[in-house]
Amino acid sequence: MTVSTTDVRIAQRGKGALRAFNEAGALVAADVHVALRLAALGGEDDPDVHLATALAVRAVRSGSVCLDLTRLRDVTVAEDDEGNPVVDPADLPWPRDEDVLDALRRSPLVVGGDRGPLRPLRLVDTTDGPLLYLDRYFRQEQTIRHVLAERSGTLPGLDEQRLAAVLDELFHHPDDPSRPSPAPDRQRVAAALAATHPTTVIAGGPGTGKTHTVARILALLTRLHGSDLRIGLAAPTGKAAARLQESVREQETALGLPPHLTAMTVHRMLGWRPGGRYRYHATNHLPYDVIIVDETSMVSLTIMCRLLEAVRPDTRLIFVGDPDQLASVDAGAVLADLVARPVTGTLDPVFERVAARDLAAVNDSREAFGPEGSDDRERLRNGVVSLSRGRRFDGAIADLAAAVRKGGADRVLKILRSGDPMVSFHDPGELDTLREDVVRSAEAVMEAAEAGDIDTTLVRSEDHRLLCAHRDGPAGVQFWARRATEWIGEATGRRLDPDRWYPGQPLLVTANDHDLQIYNGDTGVVVRQGDELVAAFARGRTPYVLRPSQLPAVSTVYAMTIHRSQGSQYGTVSVVLPDARSALLTRELLYTAITRARTHVRIVGTEDAVRAGVARQVLRASGLRREIRV
Ligand SMILES: Nc1ncnc2c1ncn2[C@@H]1O[C@H](COP(=O)(O)OP(=O)(O)OP(=O)(O)O)[C@@H](O)[C@H]1O
């Protein structure tokens, strides 16, 4: 980016350091405007406070909950047309860290300072150094902390013998239902924890059996507490809620669950009303005995705060998700924080007795709570259980995902180049096999769609998916979707007109329609049915069929962003990596992309891009992981 001084991206009122940071792209104009406005209202004229305030606004804009003052200088700057940083961030006019801290301690803008009518900032000391908050977010964190602390006790009135018996029944040996599952069985531990503690966090990568466990927890609680137990199922997005509902209903008969359980978005569950108010809150609690939230990694700090406020103290709350995946669009990485926060709680003696066999078993290193899993064992006291055994895929994809998660770039490259049939690695220009997969899967989808076979069409449409980090640019969805369309057009001799429906057309829904039960991120395919064309969506065992004209907002999807693919799985996944310098290319993004694949991951990009992605971690600052000194 090259900016002129009259550019709209430059806040004209910014002076000194603010101006320099803004011109370098380390701050945007809105960061500067907010900082100066707050300073004017609060009577603050210290430029160090102005800069810190603008950086705190920037931190929230980029997903953090606060500004970590020990990592003040971790900023990214704009790039020139060749992709080089316009300045070295270290050369920006940084004040001394001590001066910033002193100025904040004196500032009328900071809560605790005794001057000033408006105190929008909060300076918080922690065992790992000071954090600067926009006060609203600190209050939300405090609410989360308090509610979780209040909920850390145990649940009374459990029939221990019955609990143990039902656990054995639900978590039985794979070869012999009359014997309990081999210990240690983390899924059984998760269920025992959920039955005995008010708050449970079930963390695990894809295919580790989270949904399997959730269904069994519902069966356990229903058997222990009766079928009139009020169950609330929720997820952050409509698409994730629909998937949760489907998976639970699929196991309804086998497990004797209450019939027709429905899931909804967390917003809906809270009774969202225009203007941002909710029907359920601290003085009007949600009417459930059990609440399960799936895909919790996508829940923002603000929504988590609203949910915890609205939950009755004796409602069992179970959060489920993968803390290593991409976090919410809004500020916070609450699931990862819940997993990593300081351990404070105690274990219920009933839990320790019913899970004793699992907790003691240390013979299977993949599942053990042994020396390697000692952190995991500690975290049980916070109600956190990590499921570690992948049940859907094993081998090179699982190893690759683990290597990315651990940040081992050499290991990642070694696996990618191993020749294992589950993974492949291609230079950006080496597109033959990608092209073959794109064409072959599109042809299979078109053939089934033309023949009117909805089930086969939907299965084939998940054989291959092309994923990109960006929407625009040479590594973006738009460019690659166009390219895929050309390849398919050339191979089939058909002109694929995106303005007219055609059989085999892959669809991406881009807006929610609660009445139609169609959600942003849903994918479907156009299928011929006699003289008509319908849009078919996979929904458990029975496909959901609509007239294409009923769809709220839809686009043709030959390529998709990795963000959008969250929560879905495909046979082969081809990931087109952007340039190594792209700030979007992060460890979480790579991990999310890789774990979408069932049978094969193809990475198209340079070694530099792989290394940069593995190295670049999204560090969302938050106080929930720290000991706060208030
Ligand atoms: N203990 C188990 N015994 C047998 N099969 C299991 C067990 N746990 C999970 N599975 C099977 O493994 C597969 C993956 O499980 P599940 O869908 O519950 O994982 P998940 O963690 O919810 O995955 P995702 O996050 O991708 O949705 C399913 O087919 C499930 O039936």
Image: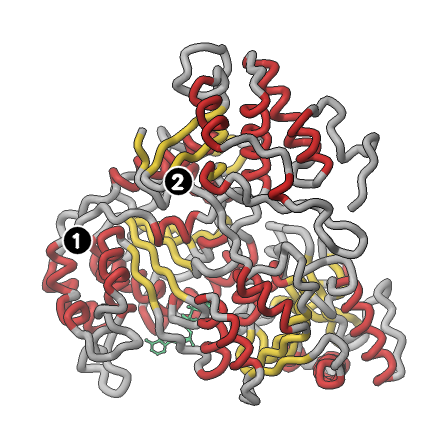
Q: Position of residue 41 (x, y in %)?
A: 58, 14
Identify the residue at image location x=22%, y=68%: 371
Ligand 1, by image quadrant, is: bottom left
SS for callout 2: loop
Q: Position of residue 171 (x, y in %)?
A: 25, 73
Identify the residue at image location x=44%, y=72%: 402
Q: Say few, some or many: other residues with alpha carbon within 10 Å of mark 1 (under 14 / 14 to 19 / 20 or more).
A: some
Spatial CA distance of label 2 from label 1 is 24 Å
Instruction: Residue type at mark 2: give it.
Output: Gly
Residue 305 seen from this side: yes
SS for callout 1: loop
Q: Which residue is mark 2?
A: 623
Instruction: Determine whether the beta carbon of the residue marked 2 sits less than 8 angstroms from the nearest atom of ligand 1.
Output: no
Q: Seen in the image, is 91 located left or right of residue 371?
A: right
- Name the foreground residue: 613 vs 625: 613
Instruction: Residue type at mark 1: give it.
Output: Leu
Mark 2 or 1, nearer chain start:
1
- Name the foreground residue: 508 vs 67: 67
The circle on residue 347 is 1
Q: Position of residue 79 (x, y in %)?
A: 73, 50
Snapshot colouring: secondary structure
Above or below, 74 relative to 356: above
Q: Position of residue 328 (x, y in %)?
A: 53, 50
The nearer-to-camera label among 2 and 1 is 2
Identify the residue at image location x=70%, y=29%: 19
Above or below, 443 relative to 573: below
Q: Seen in the image, is 203 located left or right of residue 523?
A: left
Q: Say few, some or many: other residues with alpha carbon within 10 Å of mark 2 (under 14 / 14 to 19 / 20 or more).
A: many
